[in-house]
Image (cartoon, helix red, strand yellow):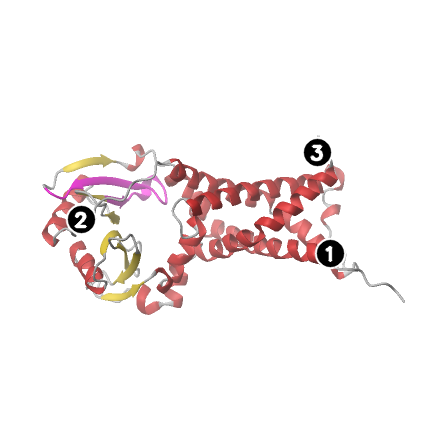
């Protein structure tokens, strides 16, 4: 049985180690809760659609993106989720370098192109999920999620005063010295939000584990970009597999196929129907309705991002993120105060 003093020591030492990463996760997570809205607010010229609602052909969008970034080819194209959204392309060159482009889907006009830092909200997403590194970054984020679970559990266990004293022990004494009040705010904030924090850490870990479990895929040859007729034929064939469904995104692997995801809101906020089509002959290779799709992220991501609970869920997660920012800053501050030599009274 671990003693309470030992539990507190473990809690403090682990918190000091992971505090910078927790701060980064909380900051990026808070903006990602309102990703599309913030992107349009800070960069309306690149992230807000102005052309008519009818979309141009997928091949037109990919051609505009590739023309703006010679030597790169589109490997993924996100179609607009809402009427005022733009299309967003990810491009790769022979060395595996990444570039990004925003396109107005109503007329195919290129709105912006460049590295990930040209698109701050995409950078926030990549930092939040993988620290800009596919496998090593995800492994670090997973360790961070497990550490956060431990901190939430040990902090609550150390605080627990018994059922009769629980409410009273959360009080903030107004007359206490500033350092004492900081400890009280840290304690009470952590305890009151321990369940949401555990929820976010657990769902975040469940999102990463399947991706880490997947074997690393060796880079294949950088094939020439498929022609316009080939792309549009393949997209049309995929759409025929799910009549009436809206395109969500298209992946262009370095192979003779495209993978097309369709919005399937009747199955969940992030659910997708999937169709894979051969580029060489336009044949349907795979058709997976959302209800039969085993991908865990379709269930977990709406919980982690708050989509399953509407605007109220996103606001609660925002409060949790802000609280985590406070905890990640106040913990090291308390440690620093404790190590400062105390002034002797004259």
Quadrant where the image shows the N terminus: top right
Q: Is residue 6 visible?
A: yes
Task: Tell me, for residue 339, which label it has, or none.
Answer: 1
The image quadrant that residue 261 belongs to is top left
Which one is earlier in the sequence, the residue at label 2 or at label 1? Answer: 2
The image quadrant that residue 207 belongs to is top left
Does the magenta-highlighted stretch encompass residue 118?
Answer: no
Q: Is residue 12 left or right of residue 208?
A: right
Q: Residue 28, how many percent across, how many down? A: 47, 56
User: Which SS class for mark 1?
Assistant: helix
> How busy is the neighbourhood of tag 2: few (under 14 within 10 Å), some, or many (20 plus)?
few
Q: Is residue 60 left or right of residue 304?
A: left
Q: Which residue is mark 2?
A: 223
Q: Which residue is mark 3?
A: 2
Range drawn in magenta: 260-280
| Pair 2/3: label in front | 2
Task: Tell me, for residue 131, which label it has, or none.
Answer: none
In space, the residues marked 2 and 1 are separated at their CA atoms by 59 Å
Which one is nearer the viewer's eye here, 219 or 147? 219
Q: Residue 184, how many percent across, how many down? A: 72, 53
Which one is earlier in the sequence, the residue at label 2 or at label 3? Answer: 3
| Pair 3/1: label in front | 1
């Amino acid at each position: 049985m671990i003693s309470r003093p030992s539990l507190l020591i473990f809690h403090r030492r682990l918190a000091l180690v992971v505090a910078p990463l927790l701060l980064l996760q909380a900051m990026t997570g808070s903006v990602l809760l309102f990703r599309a809205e913030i992107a349009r607010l800070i960069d309306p010229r690149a992230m807000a659609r102005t052309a008519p609602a009818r979309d141009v052909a997928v091949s037109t969008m990919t051609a505009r993106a590739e023309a703006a970034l010679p030597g790169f080819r589109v490997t993924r194209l996100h179609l607009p989720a809402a009427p005022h959204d733009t299309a967003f392309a990810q491009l790769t060159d022979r060395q595996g370098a990444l570039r990004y482009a925003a396109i107005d889907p109503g007329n195919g006009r290129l709105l912006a192109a460049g590295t990930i830092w040209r698109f701050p909200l995409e950078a926030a997403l990549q930092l939040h999920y993988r620290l800009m590194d596919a496998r090593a970054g995800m492994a670090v984020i997973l360790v961070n999620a497990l550490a956060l679970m431990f901190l939430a559990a040990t902090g609550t266990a150390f605080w627990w005063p018994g059922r009769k004293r629980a409410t009273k022990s959360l009080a903030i004494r107004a007359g206490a010295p500033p350092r004492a009040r900081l400890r009280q705010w840290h304690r009470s904030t952590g305890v009151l939000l321990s369940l949401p924090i555990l929820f976010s850490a657990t769902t975040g870990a469940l999102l990463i584990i399947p991706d880490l479990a997947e074997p690393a895929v060796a880079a294949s040859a950088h094939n020439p970009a498929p022609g316009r007729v080939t792309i549009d034929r393949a997209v049309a064939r995929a759409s025929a597999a799910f009549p009436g469904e809206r395109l969500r995104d298209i992946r262009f692997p370095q192979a003779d196929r495209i993978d097309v995801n369709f919005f399937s809101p009747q199955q969940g906020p992030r659910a997708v129907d999937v169709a894979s089509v051969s580029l060489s002959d336009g044949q349907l290779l795979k058709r997976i309705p959302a209800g039969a799709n085993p991908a865990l992220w379709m269930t977990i991501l709406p919980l982690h991002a708050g989509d399953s609970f509407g605007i109220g869920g996103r606001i609660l997660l925002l409060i949790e993120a802000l609280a985590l920012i406070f905890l990640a800053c106040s913990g090291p501050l308390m440690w620093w105060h404790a190590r400062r030599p105390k002034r002797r009274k004259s």
